[in-house]
Image: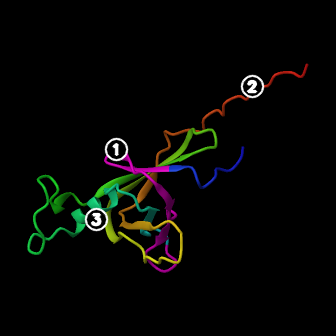
Amino acid sequence: MNPYKNSRFVGSWDGVPVLGVSKVSGLTRTPQGPLSPGQTGCAPLTLERGVTFDPAFERWANRAWFRPDIHAPLPSGQEGSDFRKDLRLDVYNDAGQKVMSYTIYRCWVSEFIALPELDSTFTAVAIQSITLENEGWQRDYSVTDPAEPAVKTTPPT
């Protein structure tokens, strides 16, 4: 059995894959007390992707920072009460089969970078990111190790 590559994954929220996510920080738990097992804290999770027209990151960030006293009201159903979401992170093997799934619970956007520093002397892709605080994560053990597809070979003639 080969280890899985870290480049085959899909993140989704509200049941919809988030397009273009190219990097996700690691899922990390640490003990709350010094060198004491038991209660743990979960590190924030950062998602990065190239800047595109898709407003998914920005819409979620706007829900967390909506303040009716300083902003025009958001359209109906987008008020700040639903700023927490569960994030689903699926990992795939080289054959494109889902091999692991994690749910990260009650995430909310604590930092949003809409545009990085722009510099006309470079040609790199502009990257936007969101940092998500969360209340923990859990692996979905109903996702099992799939049988890898058989490779068809033809005998030499």
Q: Residue 60's image quarter? A: bottom left
Residue 70's x, y, as percent?
Answer: 11, 75
**Numbered disc 1: secondary structure:** loop
Name the residue type under label 2.
Lys
Residue at (17% x, 62% y) in the render: 80
Q: Is 19 situated left or right of 3 in this image?
A: left
Q: Which label lies toward us, 2 or 1?
A: 2
Quarter where residue 94 is shown: top right
Q: Quadrant of residue 92?
A: top right
Query: Which mark is drawn over residue 61?
Result: 3
First in sequence: mark 3 vs mark 2 = 3
User: Which quarter of the rendered picture does the C terminus lie within?
Assistant: top right
The quarter of the picture where the N terminus appears is top right
Q: Position of residue 133 (x, y in %)?
A: 36, 67
Q: Mark 2, residues whose alpha carbon is within 10 Å: few (<14), some, or many (≥20)?
A: few
Left or right: residue 155 compared with residue 116 = right
Disc 2 marks which residue?
152
Residue 104 image point, x, y percent = 40, 56
Measure the alpha-carbon separation of dots 2 and 1.
35 Å
Q: Residue at x 58, y 54 (%)?
A: 7
- Name the element at disc 3: helix
Q: Amino acid at mark 1?
A: Gly
**Mark before the other along the chain sequence, 3 or 1:** 1
Q: Nearer the viewer, residue 25 or 1?
A: 25
Q: Position of residue 6 (x, y in %)?
A: 60, 55
What's the magenta region?
10-36
Q: Secondary structure at mark 2?
A: loop
The circle drawn on residue 15 is 1
Q: Residue furthest right?
A: 157
Q: How busy is the neighbourhood of tag 1: few (under 14 within 10 Å), some, or many (20 plus)? A: few
- Label 3 – label 1 distance at C-alpha: 18 Å
Q: How is the image coloured?
A: rainbow
